[in-house]
């Protein structure tokens, strides 16, 4: 019997675990020596536990920082390194390939056939070419439309298993605010799960997506895959929708694996056409026509909804934005800044001089940020540092563009105006047409 190929999987606590579960876990041709982790603070130093790793790995699998990859490849005589995380410039991915190849191993990018799970229920997938395109608001609108038509819908979210104990996150079902506390959710997790709870819906996530899907199927007529970053679906869709962003025109061809989503989707939405430049909208449209000529292209209007917006006028404002959108998503601003400017803020302050701890580190890492504060909260300590940064800030009010009610996780000494993105009325009508066509093809 030939020796098992020795593998390392490079990831960020998401697709890396999924690729292992679906292809490598019970595969006797391979020996997964380690995972490496990056992008999310503090997710290395854990172990992928025996309860998830299967009979071939009775001791579990160690998770190291990605900085150790060259050393790990050489010391363990690794044959192949599987790259498995998302929202990265193509040049970044190829630099990692060069690093791994120089150390002696092959560099692998796994595709859809080996990693997608087949559902027994019809599936709509919503993905994007970059973080922050607006896929979550589209997913929630689809949920709302389908439920009004009398269907039971389960949303399955791309993973965010950041807890130290991964066995607590094998299957997660969120239907109440108590569930968010029970699973020790970070701010990033709450940003995705809380809006569904606000609508009276349910959303599933976790680590083992075969098990998650089977649980969701018990409760649903239709599954919505609510994608994360610009990753492609874990579950094989019957309808694939990809969201693009003309504020970052051209990125649909430049980021991994977002271009895959653009090339493969049945429907491409060019979102935020109400705020983008006409020439940027046309750049995206022409790029999509070139790489996916069979896709249906629709325009999307992204509207901003603000509570108590009248109190913004004339105030010195601290703007908080959705963390992933303005950090690795690369945006300089989001809904919060647009709302502050739209409703007459006197000044948007620079929060950097008020930052503490890991919030300082984030500003040093993401140097494109100057007048917005990312809503970072990967654990209790960082939430406390975010709270202290807000309370330190010399401002009259806070305009919060994160999708959650941030007062549920921290206490501030300043008034907060909550701002959210929604789907415009015309876009909602387009989505309803898409849903009607989907129903006639899959549930008639």
Image (cartoon, rainbow, N blue to C red):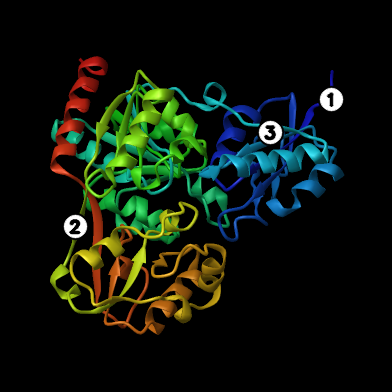
Q: Within the image, what quadrant is residue 269 found in?
A: top left
Mark sitting on residue 55: 3
| Residue 322 in the image: above or below residue 14 | below
Q: Within the image, what quadrant is residue 418 found in?
A: bottom left
Q: Within the image, what quadrant is residue 58 found in?
A: top right
From the image, tell me which residue sits under label 2. Answer: 305
| Residue 272 in the image: above or below residue 333 | above
Image location (x, y in percent) of residue 264: 43, 24
Image location (x, y in percent) of residue 220: 29, 31
In space, the residues marked 3 and 2 are separated at their CA atoms by 50 Å
From the image, tell me which residue sits under label 1. Answer: 3
Question: Does label 1 or label 3 sit earlier along the sequence?
Answer: 1
Label 2: how many residues lie within 10 Å, few (<14), some (14-19) or many (20+)?
some
* Nearer the observer, 145 or 351: 351
Question: Does label 2 or label 1 sit earlier along the sequence?
Answer: 1
Regarding residue 308, the answer to whether it shows in the image is no
In space, the residues marked 2 and 1 are separated at their CA atoms by 59 Å
Q: Are marks 3 and 2 in contact (CB under 8 Å)?
A: no
In space, the residues marked 1 and 3 are separated at their CA atoms by 18 Å
Q: Secondary structure at mark 3?
A: loop
Q: Are marks 2 and 1 in contact (CB under 8 Å)?
A: no
Q: Secondary structure at mark 2?
A: strand
Residue at horizontal 48%, vertical 38%?
A: 231
Image location (x, y in percent) of residue 89: 55, 43
Label 1: how many residues lie within 10 Å, few (<14), some (14-19) or many (20+)?
few
* Nearer the observer, 62 or 344: 344
Q: Quadrant of the N terminus?
A: top right
In the image, 410: left or right of 60?
A: left
* Nearer the observer, 194 or 365: 365
Q: Are marks 1 and 3 in contact (CB under 8 Å)?
A: no
């Amino acid at each position: 019997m030939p020796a098992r190929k020795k593998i390392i999987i490079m990831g960020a606590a998401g697709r890396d675990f999924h690729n292992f579960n679906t292809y490598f876990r019970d595969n006797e041709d391979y020996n997964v020596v380690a995972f490496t982790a990056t992008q999310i603070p503090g997710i290395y130093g854990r172990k992928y536990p025996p309860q998830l790793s299967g009979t071939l790995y009775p001791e579990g699998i160690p998770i190291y920082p990605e900085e150790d990859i060259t050393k790990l490849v050489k010391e363990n005589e690794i044959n192949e390194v599987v790259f498995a995380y998302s929202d990265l410039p193509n040049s970044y991915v190829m630099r990692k390939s060069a690093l791994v190849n120089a150390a002696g191993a092959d560099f692998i990018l796994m595709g859809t056939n080996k990693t997608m799970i087949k559902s027994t229920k019809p599936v709509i997938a919503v993905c994007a070419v970059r973080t922050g395109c607006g896929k979550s608001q589209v997913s929630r609108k689809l949920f709302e439309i389908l439920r009004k038509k009398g269907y039971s819908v389960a949303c399955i979210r791309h993973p965010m298993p950041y807890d130290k104990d991964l066995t607590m996150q094998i299957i997660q079902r969120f239907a109440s605010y108590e569930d968010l506390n029970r699973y020790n959710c970070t701010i990033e997790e709450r940003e995705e799960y809380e809006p569904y709870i606000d609508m009276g819906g349910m959303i599933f996530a976790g680590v083992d997506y075969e098990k998650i899907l089977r649980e969701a199927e018990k409760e649903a007529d239709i599954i919505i895959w609510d994608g994360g970053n610009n990753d492609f679906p874990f579950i094989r869709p019957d309808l694939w929708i990809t969201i693009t962003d003309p504020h970052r025109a051209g990125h649909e061809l430049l980021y991994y694996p977002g271009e895959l989503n653009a090339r493969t989707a049945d429907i491409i939405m060019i979102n935020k056409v109400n705020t983008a430049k006409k020439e940027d909208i046309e750049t995206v449209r022409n790029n999509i026509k070139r790489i996916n000529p069979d896709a249906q292209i629709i325009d999307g209007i992204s509207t901003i909804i603000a509570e108590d917006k009248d109190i913004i006028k004339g105030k010195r404002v601290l703007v908080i934005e959705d963390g992933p959108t303005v950090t690795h998503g690369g945006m300089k601003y989001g809904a919060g800044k647009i709302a502050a400017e739209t409703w007459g803020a006197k000044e948007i302050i620079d929060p950097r001089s008020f930052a503490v701890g890991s919030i300082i580190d984030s500003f040093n890492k993401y140097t494109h940020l100057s007048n917005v504060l990312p809503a970072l909260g990967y654990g209790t300590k960082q939430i406390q540092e975010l709270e202290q940064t807000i309370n330190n800030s010399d401002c009259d009010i806070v305009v919060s563009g994160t999708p959650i009610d941030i007062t549920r996780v921290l206490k501030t000494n300043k008034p907060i105006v909550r701002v959210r993105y929604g789907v415009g009325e015309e876009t909602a009508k387009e989505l309803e047409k898409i849903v009607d066509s989907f129903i006639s093809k899959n549930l008639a």
